[in-house]
Amino acid sequence: MVSPAPHRTYDFVIAANRLPVDRQVKPDGTTTWRTSPGGLVTAMESVMRDREAAWVGWAGFPGEAPQPFDDGHLRLVPVGLSAEELTDYYEGFSNGTLWPLYHDVIVPPTFHRSWWNVYRTVNQRFADHVARVAAEGATVWVHDYQLQLVPAMLRDQRPDLRIGWFNHIPFPPVELFAQLPWRARILRGLLGADFVGFQRPDDARNFIRSCRAVLGATHKGDVVTWGGSDDGRSGAAPRSVRAAAVPISIDAQGFRDLADSPSVKARAQEIRESLGEPEVVLLGVDRLDYTKGIRHRLRAIGELLADGEISPPEVTFVQVATPSRERVEAYRTLREQIEGTVGRINGDFSHLGDTAVHYLHQSYPREEMAALFQVADVMLVTPLRDGMNLVAKEYVTARHDGGGALVLSEFTGAAEELKTAYLCNPHDIAGLKETILRAIRDDHEEKRRRMRSLRRQVRTYDVQVWAQDFLRALEVAPHRPPRSRRS
Ligand code: GDG
């Protein structure tokens, strides 16, 4: 165990790839920090109220880490990453190896030993930072696929801690996970936790199956027991770790309030006018990522235009594709493909003043997103694989006027909960076209009925409930908490 720290320690510590703040450099060269808006920050605020909390993460720029500082009642502890480490740990192993492997190998994952080595080094650095700031017996919540080795690295130094890990993305079936040359090391890393949380029950099951197949672990229900003997170290005590689904959500009240504000409503009206007051606005909002099914969506839209089922100016499609991971090769290729397709569709089907596809490769403030959601008569969420998909939940929340329709891929975590959406298989282009047409043409009452039930689901199970459920599960793991709203 690390000897008692001479500095201040905290009973609740979050470790995530990124700190929840962005550095702003003013014209005079001085810097300030701005809290990045987002569900995770809001969720954490709701569980941090009565605790001394610290957040360990990368500050968003390469080089030496700034000194720890306070943001309100939260201690922020930056982890330094060099430009080379960012290339190998973040763009390389996290986004070139794990991301495609965990998303059904939609593009082939790349395996590089040098990336793996840097991933280990960076995970160790995160674990060391957490070990220094965590108080005796503290609760530590580790987030996501970038930090899968942190739980065991932390437990080695600090067996007194209660450690939870949450995976924001899917966990793949063992048949795919087994491709990973470092599969056993990853699983051993995760089994350092007391509780591992996933978006869907299937993800938890995939994890448990991998532990059995790769490590020879046993399981009873959702508890995995592993003897710790396959790594050649003798004397490691058996550990029991619970793996279960705790699906993430959004700050429903906060998003509703935003969507309800006069400025957002006015902006929504302005957008509709600038689109030429179409009868039907179709909308897609995604990071430009191959998991999001943007190409499949465009294919369906292109065919619907060619079939004459939809046409501008009555129907128009707006696609916001937020720039993402632009230094990773697969993302650059995808961007070229998408922009080629949009160009072809518009060349064939737009008229002067009537655009078939409005394509926006830009990032917008949250207010603008909320306004866009309100304009959308049909929201198209068609990922080939997605851990949850918060856009779907934001959309139904923004449409508190009762209008709108959500087309949602079966391959999202959200589809497990949002069962009255217009569900689709994005690989089935004919089926996708039919579903889009149904979402456009169904009568108002049918659409309102569906949206009502979707909104209720998101309101009841919001991000605050998610965080509380996760922490309740972590507190009693490997036992099941008595009052989980889900299981
Ligand atoms: C990962 C998992 C899981 C997008 N463009 C802009 C913007 N956004 C916001 C959306 C939404 C968020 O970003 C995207 O969240 P998603 O859930 O849709 O997708 P990922 O980024 O892939 O997130 C996913 C999630 O983690 C949480 O666990 O659901 O499955 O892949 O909130 O609105 N926000 C602003 N401007 C944009 O241009 N302000």
Image: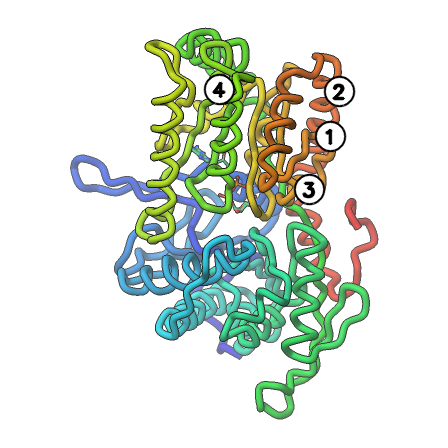
Please give the residue where the numbered disc 4 appears in the rendered image. Answer: 371
Q: Which residue, as the protein is rendered here, is positioned at the far front? A: 307
Q: How far is the residue under mark 2 from the one under mark 4?
A: 22 Å
Frontmost residue, 342 versus 145: 342
Q: Is residue 321 above or below residue 401?
A: below
Q: How far is the residue under mark 2 from the one under mark 1?
A: 9 Å
- The structure residue drawn at horizontal position 40% and vertical position 18%, both measured from the top left corner, is 349
Q: Of the residues shown, which amino acid type is indicated by label 3?
A: Val
Please give the residue where the numbered disc 1 appears in the rendered image. Answer: 420
Q: Does any atom of ligand 1 lie closer than 8 Å to the CB of label 3?
A: no
Q: Of the residues shown, which amino acid type is indicated by label 2?
A: Arg
- The structure residue drawn at horizontal position 67% and vertical position 62%, both measured from the top left corner, is 206
Looking at the image, is mark 2 or mark 3 earlier in the sequence? 2
Q: Of the residues shown, which amino acid type is indicated by label 1?
A: Thr
Res 89 label: none
Q: Of the residues shown, which amino acid type is indicated by label 4?
A: Ala
- The mark closer to the camera, 2 or 3, is 2
Looking at the image, is mark 2 or mark 4 earlier in the sequence? 4
Frontmost residue, 38 versus 158: 38
